[in-house]
Amino acid sequence: MARTSTEKPVQVGTFWSRIRHLTPHGVILEAMTTSPRPRRHLAGSPFQPDPEPTIEQYAVADMVSHDAYGMGRVTTVESAAVTVDFGSQTVRIPSPFHKMSKL
């Protein structure tokens, strides 16, 4: 006679806290869950931690190259964005500037 498990999976946030299955042999299998937070770097680890991203600083009249828009000139600088004139259009690009580099 096969038994069935009465425990149902419970969802906490976006992760399943515990999932139990009863196999035909009567063994309970539990699925492992993933941690929602990033792992901390151990001091004795031979692997280097991920470097802190550096946000490039731009000044008015700097020439820049953008992956999608091409070459342009910085027209205004704000604390969290820059406005760049690419000739055919003027675009406000928010920080961090992943697709843009200074020439």
Image: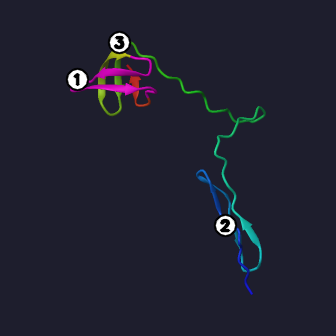
Q: Residues within 10 Å of mark 1 (few under 14, many from 20)?
A: few
Q: Quadrant of the N terminus?
A: bottom right
Amino acid type indicated by mark 2: Lys
CA distance for labels 1 and 2:
60 Å
Q: CA distance from mark 2 to mark 3?
A: 60 Å
Is residue 96 located in the magenta-colored stretch of the structure? yes
Residue pointed to by mark 2: 8
Q: Position of residue 30 (x, y in %)?
A: 72, 64
Which residue sits at x=44%, y=26%? Answer: 95
Q: Which residue is labeled 1 in the image?
A: 87
Q: Is residue 77 magenta?
A: no
Q: CA distance from mark 3 to mark 1?
A: 16 Å
Q: Amino acid at mark 1?
A: Gly
- Looking at the image, residue 93 sits to the left or right of residue 53; the answer is left
Q: Nearer the viewer, mark 1 or mark 2?
A: 2
Return the residue at label 3.
60
Residue type at mark 3 is Val
